[in-house]
Image (spheres, rainbow, N blue to C red):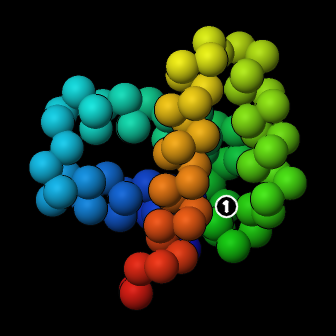
Amino acid sequence: MLLSDAVKYYEADKRIEGFSSQTLKAYKLQAKLLINFFSNIPISQISTYDLQHYLANQVKILNLQVYLTEYDLLNLYFVGLTKKVF
């Protein structure tokens, strides 16, 4: 599954769960940053090391609260999606 497909699936799942439009907008922005960093590659090609590198890069440019939000999102993308049945 491509990263962009995973993001779309995640967004649809959160919309069904009733997340607010503001929260979804914030998630979409974070997803855009993630895709810009990695390109639109299969999520199976992104390692834990790659995610650590991404977060280390992001912490340089984002404040701590945004960084923590992004960390939570990555956890949901990669841990949550692996538990879903496709």
Q: Residue flagged by tag 1: what amino acid is it?
A: Ile
Q: Is residue 32 visible?
A: no
Counting from the top left corner in percent of width and height, residue 39 is at 67, 48
Categorize mark 1 by other alpha carbons within 10 Å: few (<14), some (14-19), many (20+): some
Q: Nearer the viewer, residue 11 or 5?
A: 11
Residue at the far bottom in the pictured view:
85
Query: Residue at 13% of width from left, 49% of height from top?
Result: 18
Q: Quadrant of the C terminus?
A: bottom left
Q: Is residue 77 visible?
A: yes
Q: Nearer the viewer, residue 10 or 36?
A: 10
Query: Residue at 73% of width from left, 22% of height from top?
Result: 59
Query: Residue at 84% of width from left, 41% of height from top?
Result: 53
The part of the image, by quadrant, that contains residue 46 is: bottom right
The part of the image, by quadrant, that contains residue 40 is: bottom right
Q: Quadrant of the N terminus?
A: bottom right
From the viewer's perspective, tell me whether residue 69 is left or right of residue 62. left
Counting from the top left corner in percent of width and height, residue 28 is at 39, 37
Q: Nearer the viewer, residue 18 or 42?
A: 18
Counting from the top left corner in percent of width and height, residue 9 is at 35, 64
As drawn, 67 above or below 71: above
Q: Nearer the viewer, residue 16 or 7?
A: 16
As drawn, 39 above or below 66: below
Mark 1 lies on a secondary structure that is loop
As drawn, 54 above or below 3: above
From the viewer's perspective, tell me whether residue 42 is left or right of residue 75. right
Q: How many marks?
A: 1
Query: Residue at 18% of width from left, 33% of height from top?
Result: 21
The part of the image, by quadrant, that contains residue 33 is: top right
Residue labelled with disc 1: 41
